Image: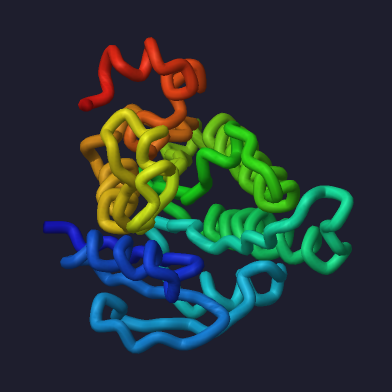
Amino acid sequence: MVVRSVVIIGGGSEIGIAIAEAFAGDRVIGAGLTATDHPAYADFVVADASTSDGADAIIQHAGAVDVLVLAAAAQPVAAAVDTTDAQWHAAIANTLDAAFYPARAALRVLPPGGSIVAVTSVNGFLAAPGLPGYAAAKSGVDGLVRQLALEYGPRGIRVNAVAPGMIGATGLERVTEGYPLGRTGTAREVADAVEFLASERASFVTGVVLPVDGGLSIASPAAFLRPDLRARFLPG
């Protein structure tokens, strides 16, 4: 078995740790603003990936990089007119900048067969109230994924993303009604999709933003708002 060097940006989050666990058997290095001693990590770098210097330091510390996972994000909640400059810049910096700078640094050392996988969100292509900065940043990551996949495919480097729906929510029955599978997701389900896209099983897949959303993004709102349509497939 080939042991890959996997770097996870945003490694201290619930999803980041689940991704680290999904790469068990590989050399997994986490990076984030605060340290974690989770046993899934061989090493953890405290650095700000939203800056060029911080991202370069992470990749230099890792040495060889075979897989880069971009899982950092900030989600300030406010209507557009109430969004402060600080909230806007936090969303862009901690989501989009924290994807671009590590990707740029890693692309200098990723070998043919290397892979980048970003964790974006259905909010990048489905609107929800109060998330202007987060939605713009996640949409930007989606565009970045396609751009890098096009430019670096000839070098044998694949770039993809997963776009989770709501993860880990409990006690929100009205929310889960909007999901065809009837529930929200788990961090491990996101992690498994990330590991798949980084693996040889997805060797001919690049430039893809894969929804991991229980079918949320395929459902017409009418299916849930109109009682006659709801009755066709929802139990009860």
Q: Name the residue located 30 percent from the left edge and 34 percent from the top edge.
A: 203
Q: Is residue 113 left or right of residue 125?
A: left
- Quarter holding the N terminus is bottom left
Q: Name the one closer to the observer, 161 or 234.
A: 234
The quadrant in which residue 19 appears is bottom left
The quadrant in which residue 94 appears is bottom right
Q: Work out whether 194 lies above or below 22.
A: above
Q: Position of residue 183 (x, y in %)?
A: 29, 43
Q: Is residue 94 left or right of residue 84?
A: left
Q: Work out whether 52 lies above or below 206.
A: below
Q: Name the residue located 49 percent from the left edge and 22 percent from the top edge.
A: 225
Q: Name the one closer to the observer, 175 or 141.
A: 175
Q: Name the residue located 44 percent from the left edge and 57 percent from the top edge.
A: 69
Q: Position of residue 164 (x, y in %)?
A: 43, 45
Q: Report the coloring of the rendering.
A: rainbow
Q: Name the residue located 43 percent from the left edge and 23 percent from the top edge.
A: 224
Give the mark count.
Answer: 0
Q: Is residue 177 visible?
A: yes
Q: Name the one closer to the observer, 13 or 29.
A: 13
Q: Name the one closer to the observer, 114 or 193.
A: 193
Q: Is residue 82 left or right of residue 20?
A: right
Q: Is residue 157 visible?
A: no
Q: Position of residue 165 (x, y in %)?
A: 44, 43
